[in-house]
Image (tube, rainbow, N blue to C red):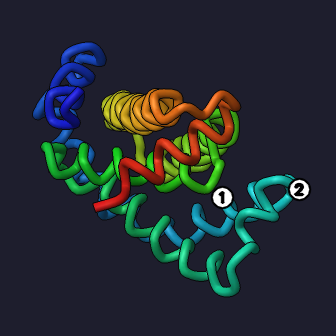
Amino acid sequence: MDPGELLDLLKRRTGFTQTHAAILKELGEVMAPIAPEVALAFYDYLGRDEELSSILHAVPGRVERLYGTFAAWYRELFSGTYDRAYAERRRRIGLVHARLGIGPRAMVPAMGLVQELSLEHLRSALRGLEVFSAVEAFEKILAIEVALVEESYLEALSRGLLLGHRDVGEALKEGAKALLSP
């Protein structure tokens, strides 16, 4: 499915509105400053897993580069702009993860950590009823994020199987590689 069309579908299914987008944009002032801290916790979490640690450290300097990439991704959660280009960037993120062999069983729990840290910060930074609308908007965009990335995994897996790879892990990697090729 086209990433823009998928995003529109996910917005309808989650009930994500322009009001949620506006709330997230306002939250950027509160949330963007913790991006480096969340990135550090995220990669610390992944680094404790032997399989994921080997992927992270396979290339010198990869983890350090990923801190910046992650922080930019995190800040974009609070950009207020959720359009076709946004969805296409999420598709690419999923395909790059798939190419490296990082599938949903690694991504979904790691996103749970992002959710936990972010909600904790929201609850401590905001007061009163504004917490409820902030949490609602954040949880909706995170659900959309996970669905966009998971769809890219399915796209990569399907392509890999069509290319004749029968091992699921290999089909995921090779399908993503083919989709990322110009």
Left or right, 162 with reference to 172: left
Helix, strand or loop for disc 2: helix
- In the rendered image, residue 27, in percent from the top left (x then y), is placed at 30, 52
Residue at 68% in and 38% down: 169
Q: Is there any visible trace of residue 151 in the rendered image?
A: yes
Mark 1 or mark 2, which is nearer the start of the sequence? 1
Work out which residue is located at the far top of the displayed protein and give it.
Answer: 13
Residue at 13% in and 44% down: 83
Residue at 35% in and 29% down: 140
Question: Where the N terminus falls, by quadrant?
Answer: top left
Q: How crowded is mark 1: few (under 14 residues within 10 Å), some or many (20 or more)?
A: some
> Residue flagged by tag 1: what amino acid is it?
Phe
- In the rendered image, residue 26, in percent from the top left (x then y), is placed at 22, 53
Of tags 2 and 1, the one toward the viewer is 2
Q: Count the labels in the image.
A: 2
Residue occupied by mark 2 = 50
Residue at 18% in and 50% down: 80
Task: Give the number of the disc on residue 59.
Answer: none
Residue occupied by mark 1 = 42
- Where residue 111 sits, quadrant-wise, is top right
Image height of 105 relative to 124, above or below: above
- Where residue 15 sits, quadrant-wise, is top left
Q: How crowded is mark 2: few (under 14 residues within 10 Å), some or many (20 or more)?
A: few
User: Which residue occupies the foreground of this view, 14 or 117?
Assistant: 14
Work out which residue is located at the far front of the displayed protein and give it.
Answer: 164
- In the rendered image, residue 11, in percent from the top left (x then y), is placed at 22, 24
Question: Where the C terminus falls, by quadrant?
Answer: bottom left
